[in-house]
Amino acid sequence: MADKFISRPEEIMLLVVWKLKDNAYGITIREFIQEMTGKYWSIGAIYVPLERLEKKGLLASYNSSPSPERGGRRKRLFKITPAGITELNELYRMNSVLWKGYPKLSPDENK
Amino acid sequence: MTMTKEKKTETRLIECLLEKFLSGNYTEAFIGDLLESYEIRAADSRISAKIWLLFQLLSSLFSLLRKNIYGGVAMFKNYFLMAFRNLKKHRTYTLINVFGLALGLSATILILLYLQFEISYDRFHENADSIYRVCIRHLREGMSEGETHVYTPPIGPDMKKDFPEVEDFVRMSTLRVAYLNVDNKAFKVDRIRYASPSLFEVFSFKLKSGNSRTALVDPFSIVLSEQTSERIFGSKDPIGETIQIGPEDLYKVTGIVENPPSNSSIQFNALISFETLYARPIMRMDWNGGNQIITYVKLRENATASSVEEKFPDFLWRNINQRIAQYGWKNEAYLQPLKKIHFYYDQSSRTALVNFYTFSAVAIFILLIACINFVNLTTARAARRAREVGIRKVIGAHRGNLIRQFLGESVAMTLLAFTVGIGVAFILTPTYNQLLNKELNPFELLNFTSIFGLLFLILLVGFASGIHPAFYLSSFQPAKTLKGIFDTARGNRKFRNALVVFQFVISVTLIICTLLIRNQLSYIKKAELGYNKENMVIIPLADQDLRTKTEEMRGALLSLPGIVQAAASSDVPHNGFTSNGYIPEGYSHSIMIHALDADEHFLETYSIDLVKGRNFSKEFATDRDAYLINETLAKQLGWDDPLGKTIRRNGDRKVIGVVKDFQFATLHNLIEPLLITNTPWRKEFDYLSIKISTDDIPSTLGSIEKIYKRFSPLIPFEYFFLDDAFDRLYKSEEKFEKIFQYFSLLAICIALLGLFSLTAYSAQQKSKEIGIRKVLGATVPQILALFSRETVVLIIVANALACPVALFVIQRWLGNFAYRSSISVWAFVMAFFGSMAAAFVTISYQSLKAALKKPADELRSE
């Protein structure tokens, strides 16, 4: 497990890559995130957390073979590492502990 | 495959752009993602896909670029730090570098101010682009007899009538001087013009009070400049006041106009309505009229000057040429653009243009000298930075990085120097203005173009001085420099020496020119004029009373003890006489001859000798219709015995004598043909010349004034000494010489500054050598010789190169004068010894310091 907490975008990204299994690359990741979160992500922006995760050793990446619809460019496919899985487990444990007993509150309730 | 190709052309630009900009692991994947998404969208709509792509590009770029930019900033910070440390560590060098550059830049700023002022002439008029001055060329038998913009009154209105291109015209008389009488007090006002009412519409002279449409409409209206109004009326509002000019004419003040700016070629202190000339004609107002009117035309927006000029031949034929053609005369006309008048068509244009180019050149040269200092100091100290360069290269700096670093350093240095320079320029502006006799305002540089220009100048100077050091320093090989093998390359020293020689060629040239200009000016002042201008008091006969009683007044003056002789004349010799066309005996056409009207005492008063014949005399009544001519005219006409020959203008008149040549104009010209008549035009003389004795001049002047008051109680006593007026003629040249002198002094100072620090550097480098030489028995003079040898050679070479350059330049300048002093060898000798001595003094401090050091101190370390 990493010494520090990972950021929220990184957390989301890690989960998405795990969910996409063997087809995790720029476009699929972005589409998936936009669907799940309903927030807009630019194409370039997703690479920032991805790169950080890779540096931390939670993700690994490799290049696919070039494909014609990409102007002859290769895809960068991402895959979660064992360390990434550990991190996900730890996150899940931490989140469920933290969120335990939380009912759905209405914004007025805190008055 | 076809699809791929098509797609490629569409998105290639973006791909290229991205590949250039991005660096990192994910670039390829990122571009691939973009293109794939683009393809998906393009299947629906190509245009919306394109817009999307562009949007994506912009929104993604920032997050990807941030990292790259951050890296750049960090590096830049390091460059800055290194530059700052370097500057701090070597304070003397920095100081000399910055100070020299600052001096050069402040001189440049001052010169730029002047240049900007000169360029700004007449540009403040809103319609400046469409205003032209009409200029007439007089031709006789197809040969030009001179050009003038001063012509007859009707040409303006007739042009407006005949040419659809002409929207409006302004007529203006030449400058007049008059006494303005208000409440029995007379004020002498010069630069008075008659002007059309359209003046305020066509030009941008603004009325402070009064109605610009009507101010100059009625005859006998006068508009005063602010300055004149204040002089005459003080703070009182003068509108509606009455001013008397001459014995009977009453003028009404109808307006106050802002003083014409000093960068206006049209100057005036008061304007009188043009209609006045028709109400009280002082000249003919038709096409045969007196040539005293300047005409400006404003063309319509889409009209060109050439379309008007095409119609001039026909226009002039109808109005004037068909009548004068029988005498062989013809007039041609063309239009002078208002904005070009100052540099090309004004009386002083030649000087203005010469000064403009000279000062531009001087500014460039001074900057060059300052830049060279920077180049020399930086390359000379290259060894000190060789290690830094080596380390940087080893760590992975490209040559490009290093070049950028060093260029950045020199630009930063220039910026620093510029800040100091602009401060110096601001401080010096008042003195400078006094020298130039102009009102330049450094704040005028605070406009968009100037600021842009100055920034460009900073970059230019920064690059010019940094480019060589940057390439030189960045070329070091790390392996060598880090091992400590650093060869102060011989080639590089040669280059430095060449630059030093160049600096001194410029400064020595400037010095020689200054000396020779000064030489010429003093030559002019002492030149033999052919008449005696010393102790000559001139009284302008402005008042009607004085003009009619000139003879009586002369008699009264001669009875005074201090007065030697006195004479009345139409003009006094110093800046030339008017010329007219005359037809000499045996000629079928007229030639231009200068004319002077003088009484019979003139020759004696001015000590002008008669060569042949006799002077005018009261005893011969026919002398009223006789001529004296000068030798030049006799020679030009080929008359060996001119006595008794006749010259025609309004009737034949006999020549009764020949006077020795005297220079009645400035020494820019040769002596021209002259004839002297005994009868003034309009029966009255304009000047009284009084020759006084040298003893007790103040009391003589006092008694002259008393007599003057007796004849003219109203008009204040006014006089001038002829030699003062003579000196004033060369004021502009003297001013030029003075400024030139300061700038050449500055140039050599900056060059010496460079030499000083170069010597300091080489003294430091040679400290070990000197130590060893001293141990082995070298004396101080020997070591001094070691230092000076190289410099002496450089100065000699520089002088040798500067001589022909200076000779060339000065000969062109002397071309302005018909009378030239011989180019004295002394100037060259003085410049040589001067520069040598200055250089020697400069290097002696550093070399003496080095020579006097104890060898033990120098050799102890290591």
Image (tube, rainbow, N blue to C red):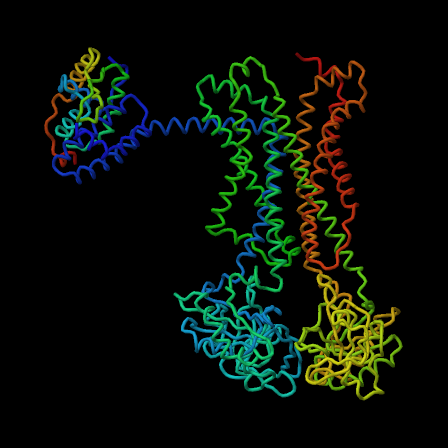
Q: Residue at image x 51%, y 39%?
A: B460
The one nearer the camera, B312 or B514, is B312
Q: Is residue B679 left or right of residue B290?
A: right
Q: Is residue B500 above or below residue A66?
A: below
Q: How far across and down, in percent of the image, does residue B387 sit?
A: 54, 19
Q: Is residue A14 above or below residue B289?
A: above
Q: Is residue B427 left or right of residue A84?
A: right
Quadrant where the C terminus of chain B sits is top right
Q: How far across and down, in percent of the image, does residue B528 sit?
A: 81, 62
Q: How far across and down, in percent of the image, does residue B544 sit?
A: 70, 84
The one nearer the camera, B487 or B197, is B487
The one nearer the camera, A111 or A100, is A100
Q: How far across and down, in percent of the image, does residue B254 sit?
A: 52, 79
Q: Is residue A29 above or below residue B9?
A: above
Q: Is residue A87 above or below residue B708?
A: above
Q: Which residue is the extreme one toward the left?
A: A103
Quadrant where the N terminus of chain B sits is top left
Q: Is residue B684 left or right of residue B79?
A: right
Image quadrant of residue A36? top left
Image quadrant of residue B245? bottom right
Give the tally of numbered discs: 0
